[in-house]
């Protein structure tokens, strides 16, 4: 009731609001309405060795509009990265996340910055969700000083330690024991926080994952292993790589939950459930049923091992951004135009960040030798021709 | 000395000193002695006592008191939250250790021998060594990987490899190799305090050896600098570099050479990465001859790096070709006579030194 009154009043005083907003330079008119709205997740959760969280989720206009904006921003960012790569401004590896945005956004909504996240190399959007800026992303991708790793890491090595985002890892599966180590440390320090260690369906068969899971279960670590199952490990479909692709069950004695990873509210619900579980009972596995529109990386067209029909089918039926758009429109939380305006703003933000990043300088040559050690002890290091290039490590 | 007095006045230091003192064997007039094992144990104990972020993790480190008893008594003193027995899953627990270090804890991860570190080497190199660089300084990794390395006695090919040159080739790691008890205690303390990943390569056969120790050594603040070699024996005719068990061999070789009028300078490297090139260089410029000694495989070994470095920096000072003594270029055999041939012996070092001084005996028939 109150909601529709609020909305009708805002459209009546629309012009006044507009001039007000331009006077105050509000960048986006996201509703601050926090009246609870109840929504059902797309599909119920499936569980292994634990009870199932309710598929009824509480949300509100502010949250839904924030979700829309955040996911639209991530979508635009990844598509822009595609163009930059083709323009050869990004080199080497570039693994894009478009299609999977709901996992990053839903997870962030369920937790705080005290909780830790670690992921593999498809990390651009996770970095943004943890508070990273577009400039840091594009500058890092283009190897510039303003990059989050000052241009020394590249696409696969984004970090934001002050938000407890631990990267950004290039070796498939390695991030899972690392994540269990973060959980160990959280427990050791009695921080009452959890770690989300993300991995793909390709990494799900790695031995070290099971080693880390065993230790996490033995020591009751607050570790949440999140399998972002986009159904293809590079070019290998899950049924060709895993004897059992029911990844949420692979923990055996460790409970698991299967979640529709294209539904941001389901992701949020599952992560809230998992955090509570992990703090009390130790590790849990979340399998996010998700999809990537791009190939594995920019060198993979993504169409040799799956059909274009499949890709368009997912885009039409399950796209996370579209789902939220429909939800917002069906609940009258914003107009189509307002959502399109949001998308335009987001596009401009991305374009501005790219322009800024392009102007940013490459790292100074002296940076070749910085950060080899945290404490360099005045040791000497060498360039390719050691008689020509030497440095003392700080 | 003043630092020692100041430390002793702190109540905290008394409990830290106690373990070291209790491990002493003091003779009526002789210097105090301590085994390498006791030295390592005291270093772990004191560092764990001083910093609650330090914890120990590995196979059998807790209830078993350590496979080689290095961690004896630590579980009882610090509890199961800080002394953790792991399953036999090196990749898993090494990764967990590195993750804990990312968060800010200071793990000491024990490998029962470094042969098993190969199961976890991705975490040592890619997760630990390179992280500070890739993150431009955001993610430092204050971890120590320690355990016995190299040949023991009769343990065969899969349990005898020396990993010094493998780890020392990697930028981002620090690689330390103690010889004496003083080395063991001082370098392990330095390693634990260091904010970077340190690979600490011990030697099983040295654990039981006793060395004289000073009062300074017994103080809880005792620490050796990383990256500095020690000249164990000053000499003027030939430089012999060695590390770990081979230092003992080199010193024995020096005694034998002395009788033949060759005055050898023996350098205990202590730190394989960073390598103390300036100490080695200064020694070569004095003696003009170099023998490098190591236990590991010869190809691409530590000696190869030292020889290349000396030739690059001090070519004009060399009066003889540089020489390398290393383990044999074969997997370690089991039979005692073959094993003996696979590892450098004192006579190998003596022979090489004489060659460098143009005093060699006629060459034996080559196989």
Image: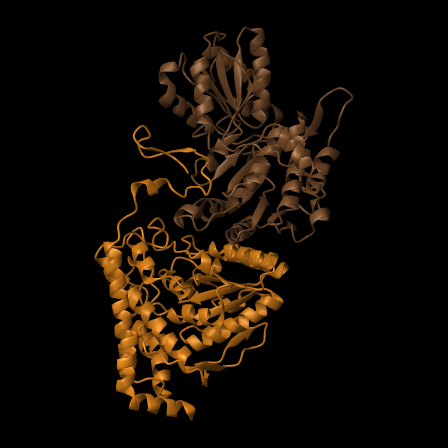
**Where does residue B24 sit, x and y in percent of width and height?**
73, 30
Q: Answer whether residue B342 is visible to the viewer in this image.
A: yes
Place residue B350 in its image quadrant. top right
Residue lying at the far left of the rendered structure = A87
The N terminus of chain A appears in which quarter of the rendering?
A: bottom left
Q: Colour of chain A?
A: orange
The residue sitting at 70% across, 26% down in the picture is: B33
Place residue A332 in its image quadrant. bottom left
Q: Answer whether residue A207 is visible to the viewer in this image.
A: no
The residue sitting at 28% across, 57% down in the picture is: A299
**Where does residue A52 sit, x and y in percent of width and height?**
55, 77
**Where does residue B222 sit, x and y in percent of width and height?**
61, 33
Place residue B18 in its image quadrant. top right
> What is the basis of the colouring in this image?
by chain
* In the depicted structure, whether residue B21 falls above or below residue A80: above
* In the depicted structure, whether residue B177 falls above or below residue A232: above
The C terminus of chain A appears in which quarter of the rendering?
A: top left
Relative side of A185 to B359, left or right: right
Relative side of B257 to B214, left or right: left
**Where does residue A392 sit, x and y in percent of width and height?**
39, 34
* In the depicted structure, whether residue A282 falls above or below residue A359: below
Query: Which of B97 and A211 lies nearest the eye of the viewer?
Result: B97
The residue sitting at 68% across, 30% down in the picture is: B35
Query: Which of A31 and B118 lies nearest the eye of the viewer?
Result: A31
Query: Which of B25 and A163 lies nearest the eye of the viewer?
Result: A163
Residue lying at the far right of the rendered structure = B28
Q: Colour of chain B?
A: brown
């Amino acid at each position: 009731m109150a909601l529709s009154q609020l909305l009708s009043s805002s459209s009546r005083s629309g012009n006044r609001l507009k001039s007000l907003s331009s006077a105050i330079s509000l960048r986006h008119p996201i509703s601050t309405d926090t009246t609870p709205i109840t929504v059902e997740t797309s599909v119920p959760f499936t569980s292994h060795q634990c009870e199932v969280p309710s598929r009824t989720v509480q949300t509100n206009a502010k949250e839904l509009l924030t979700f829309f904006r955040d996911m639209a921003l991530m979508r635009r960012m990844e598509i822009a990265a595609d163009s930059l790569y083709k323009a050869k401004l990004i080199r080497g590896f570039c693994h894009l996340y478009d299609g999977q945005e709901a996992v990053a956004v839903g997870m962030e909504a369920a937790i705080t910055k005290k909780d830790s996240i670690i992921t593999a190399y498809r990390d651009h959007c996770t970095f943004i969700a943890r508070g990273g800026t577009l400039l840091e992303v594009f500058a890092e991708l283009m190897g510039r000083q303003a990059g989050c790793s000052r241009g020394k890491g590249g696409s696969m090595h984004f970090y934001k330690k002050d938000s407890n985002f631990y990267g950004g890892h290039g070796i498939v599966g390695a991030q899972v024991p690392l994540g269990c180590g973060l959980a160990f440390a959280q427990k050791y320090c009695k921080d009452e926080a959890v770690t989300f260690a993300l991995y793909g369906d390709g990494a799900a068969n790695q031995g070290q994952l099971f080693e880390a899971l065993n230790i996490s279960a033995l020591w009751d670590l607050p570790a949440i292993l999140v399998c972002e199952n986009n159904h293809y490990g590079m070019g290998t479909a899950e049924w060709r790589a895993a004897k059992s692709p029911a990844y949420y069950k692979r923990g055996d004695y460790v409970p698991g939950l299967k979640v529709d990873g294209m539904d941001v509210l389901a992701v949020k619900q599952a992560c809230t459930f998992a955090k509570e579980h992990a703090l009390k009972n130790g590790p849990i596995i979340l399998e996010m049923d998700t999809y990537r529109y791009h190939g594995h990386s920019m060198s993979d067209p993504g169409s040799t091992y799956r059909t274009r029909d499949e890709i368009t089918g997912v885009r039409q039926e399950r796209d996370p951004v579209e789902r939220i758009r429909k939800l917002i429109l069906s609940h009258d939380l914003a107009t189509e135009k307002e959502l399109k305006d949001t998308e335009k703003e987001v596009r401009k933000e991305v374009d501005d960040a790219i322009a800024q990043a392009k102007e940013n300088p490459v790292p100074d040559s002296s940076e070749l030798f910085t950060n080899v050690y945290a404490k360099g002890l005045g040791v000497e290091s060498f360039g390719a021709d050691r008689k020509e290039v030497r440095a003392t490590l700080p | 000395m003043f630092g020692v007095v100041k430390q002793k006045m702190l109540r905290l230091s008394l409990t830290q000193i106690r373990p070291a003192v209790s491990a002493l064997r003091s003779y009526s007039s002789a210097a105090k002695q301590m085994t390498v094992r006791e030295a390592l144990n005291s270093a772990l104990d004191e560092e764990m006592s001083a910093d609650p972020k330090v914890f120990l993790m590995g196979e059998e480190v807790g209830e078993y008191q350590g496979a080689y008893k290095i961690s004896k008594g630590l579980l009882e003193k610090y509890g199961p939250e800080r002394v953790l027995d792991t399953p036999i899953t090196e990749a898993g627990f090494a990764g967990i250790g590195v993750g804990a270090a990312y968060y800010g804890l200071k793990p000491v991860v024990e490998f029962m021998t470094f042969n098993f570190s190969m199961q976890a080497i991705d975490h040592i190199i890619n997760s630990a060594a390179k992280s500070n660089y890739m993150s431009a300084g955001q993610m430092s990794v204050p971890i120590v990987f320690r355990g016995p390395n190299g040949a023991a006695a009769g343990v065969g090919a899969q349990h005898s490899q020396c990993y010094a040159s493998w780890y020392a080739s990697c930028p981002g790691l620090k690689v330390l190799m103690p010889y004496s008890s003083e080395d063991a205690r001082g370098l392990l303390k330095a390693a634990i305090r260091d904010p970077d990943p340190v690979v600490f390569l011990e030697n099983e056969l040295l654990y039981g050896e006793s060395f004289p120790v000073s009062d300074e050594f017994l103080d809880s603040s005792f620490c050796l600098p990383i990256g500095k070699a020690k000249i164990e024996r000053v000499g003027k005719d030939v430089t012999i570099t060695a590390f770990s068990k081979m230092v003992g061999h080199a010193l024995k070789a020096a005694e034998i050479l002395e009788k033949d009028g060759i005055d050898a300078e023996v350098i205990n490297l202590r730190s394989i990465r960073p390598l103390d090139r300036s100490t080695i260089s200064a020694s070569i410029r004095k003696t003009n001859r170099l023998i490098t000694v190591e236990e590991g495989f010869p190809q691409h070994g530590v000696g190869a790096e030292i020889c290349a470095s000396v030739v690059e920096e001090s070519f004009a000072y060399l009066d003889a070709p540089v020489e390398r003594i290393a383990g044999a270029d074969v997997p370690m055999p089991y039979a005692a006579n073959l094993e003996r041939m696979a590892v450098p012996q004192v006579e190998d070092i003596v022979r090489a030194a004489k060659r460098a001084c143009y005093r060699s005996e006629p060459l034996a028939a080559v196989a």
